[in-house]
Image: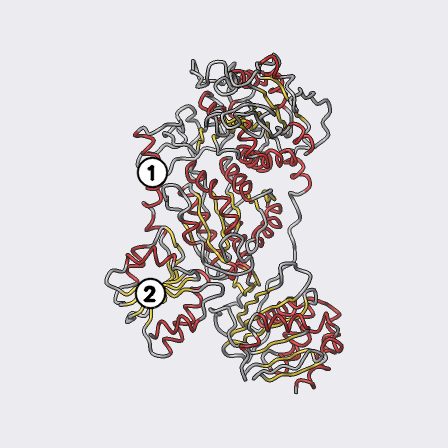
Amino acid sequence: MSTPRIRIRTGNQMVAEGALHAGCLFFAGYPITPASGIYKSMIEELPKRNGVAISSPDEISALAYCVGASARGAKAMTATSGPGWSLMVETVQYALMTELPVVIAVVQRLGPSTGGATQGAQGDVLLTEYCTSGAYTIPVFAPSTAAECFEVTTLATYWAEELRTPVVVLSDKEIGMMSEDVNIDALHAWPVHQRKSVPAGENGAYKTYDFASPADVPLFAPVGGEHKTTITGSAHDKRGALQKNSPETIAVLRHLQEKVTARAEEMAYVKTDDDPGADTLVVSFGITARTAKEAAAQARAKGRRVRLVNVISLFPVPETLLTAAAEGCSRVLVAEENMTGQYRSVIRHLFPGKSVEGINGFGAMITPDAILERIMA
Amino acid sequence: MSTVQQTTFLRESVAFPFCKGCGHHHYVHNLDRAFAALQLDPQKACIVSDIGCIGILDALFATPHTFHTTHGRSTAFATGVELADGILHDSKLKSVVVIGDGGATIGLLHVVNAALMNVDVTVLVANNMLYGMTGGQNSGFSPLEFVTPTTPEGNIVPPMDICAMVKSCGAEYVTRVSATDKNLAGVIADAIAHPGFALVEIVELCTEFAIGRNKIDGKVIQSMSSGYEPALLPTTFARKEFCEEYKEKVLGRPAKTKDDTITQKYISSLRGAKRWVIAGTAGEKVQLSSYLLMRAGILCGLHATQKNDNPVTQGSGFSLSEVVMSSGDIHYTGITVPDAVIIASAEGLKEVTVNGTFARCAPSTVIVMEDSLPELQSPARVYRVPMRSLCTPLRATTSAAAALLARENLLPREAMAESIRLHVGEKAALYEQDIEKLLPLLA
């Protein structure tokens, strides 16, 4: 076996490298700690590949530029943190409604408001997921290492293109700004994927939002291409004509959700560190999943049977995988760096009859001892 | 490509959804005439519409692409379309933003920024001086004394002059005309044809909310006070369109040839993890020290992480860096009990005290600190060395870290030397001398 090739990279750099690998050719950015490293990397790298990396005057413009570019057919991405995400929410909804793929990396910091720019947190789990009127499912993927930042960004791009919907990479300050050794020979990438396009020569017959079954994803045609496109963020029929509440319009609005939920099982992605005889399941994600790993190793050394799940696909909630992971366990501990147990509130119903407990931190990383203590209790 | 030249881009016998007498009728017809006059291929035309009465005109058009967006943001979406079209494609698509004075008020930044960039977007502002769709509220374009449902005593805030505004941003094609102007189609066509940002402010009257409340009519619109004088058409154009500029100046930047791949060259005796904190003054290479340490560890096949901290302003106050090196995967990336702490200055000392590192030192911790700093009470083993004077402030933390590394025998000394050499070249010899001076003091 040859010696592994190692590079020192931050999580932010690896998000950028993942996006480039996935074929992202358009990035619009507005600086914000702790996400700026992604912006910087894309500004450095994209022009070398004849791509567009551009500074925008604010986060609203950044995402609108991306969605405009996506309408022209480009794989597009931006990156921000909680305060910038707040400004982008209008356009996230627009991208969802207009079925224009875009990837948004949200590198969490301590909130609320401008909060603590250089303090880590996992407090934007619900903010990113539940940002739409109608509470549509936005796929949210969370990396826990620099290498996973690469992988998860290729995965997010895959699903954004496949489903034609906005997808979030939910990182945090610790993962984003910390440097670590990355074995570039061991990186995992998801297939490079392009939204399915309408074939040439169907001019006149093309409907921008056409589908046969509600879970189908409409075939894409770019603005500026041979098929006349009719894009709108208002309630519309399959042609893209503004409608109040015709049955077809309501079907289109339902389809926006159904195309995502129909693929939920496929999107489900967790990393399980199993012990078949475990009585305790620890569920975590992002930076805290690393800490949970350390705590579990210590618990096992003390003879405790514990199973770990690192949830990569936070949303759609990987219900089947989580339910299966809890099999045989009487307790489910959900470790996350926010005050109220945001992800726990979403998954607790999956574990009837089991004790579901939160391990929460705020203002600092959760320590291995804090998790160990609860495993051993 | 269409083979038959279209005389209209509008849908056949479509009923306009506007009130009788509304200037939007003129707007739509003249936009359509402009498209026809330009003989645009409809596949290469995109109407990017905003919210409001004028924003629903997209449904009237049959053949160009239509992109109905959110309130005020239309210019930003159009900018994105044109950036992708102009840089990633053949730059043939013409995007026309259809926006009212309300949308222009909300999205002023997007209009201003498109003008600054000189991106190939044409913004046609339908200025009827109020928000028509939502009940006639005054907008940022309402003239002084203008009576609306929300300014019943007359508007007391002067209107913005969007033409002057975008001109000040370098926009070259800017003009203001009345919706009833006989040459409106020609003006719009010129604006669309202009290879860069163009803005036409089309002044209209809202029959529903303006007429009746105000003593104005179409005849006096052009001579209204408060900045509604007709603007002159431009005669010269000097700026290059943004995408052209970008392709010329930014694209094709040579790829960096520097390969920063590291492969293991040395063997470390370390089993388990070591967690180090290095603290000093911002600008004195604290974070570089940690990077070199981390790199040395990786040269020995170890895993390593590095985290940096500094105040909000980057060049003053403290600088603090944490490095974890481990023979196994590093899961928890924080430092509870540090194995080593290097403190090079008063700022660094203050920071390790404030952030709790100092309080978490244990008998197993080694502290190497600048000897001019105050005495400390700590269970740790403390070495006080004149690192600033022996090594200079800029080399102090790196040399102290390298000396401690050698003293603890965690890595082969050559690994750190190589790491330093790679970064500073020939000056590495100075660090070697520093280490020799420091080593006896760490005995």
Chain-order first, disc 2 or disc 1: 1
The answer to whether any part of residue B3 appears in the image is no
> Which quarter of the rendering shows the C terminus of chain B?
bottom right
Mark 2 highlights which residue? Answer: A357
Q: Position of residue A88 (x, y in %)?
A: 50, 44
Residue B44 position (above or below residue A292): above
Q: Position of residue B51 (x, y in %)?
A: 48, 29
Is residue A263 found left or right of B289 in the rendered image? left
Q: Nearer the viewer, residue A224 or B241?
A: B241
C-alpha span from label 2 to label 1: 35 Å
The answer to whether any part of residue A129 appears in the image is yes
Is residue B32 found left or right of A333 in the rendered image? right
What's under tag 2, amino acid-wise?
Answer: Glu
In front: label 2 or label 1: 2
Q: Residue at x 68, y 34 (%)?
A: B169
Is residue B70 found left or right of A47 in the rendered image? left
What's under tag 1, amino acid-wise?
Answer: His
Mark 1 highlights which residue? Answer: A255
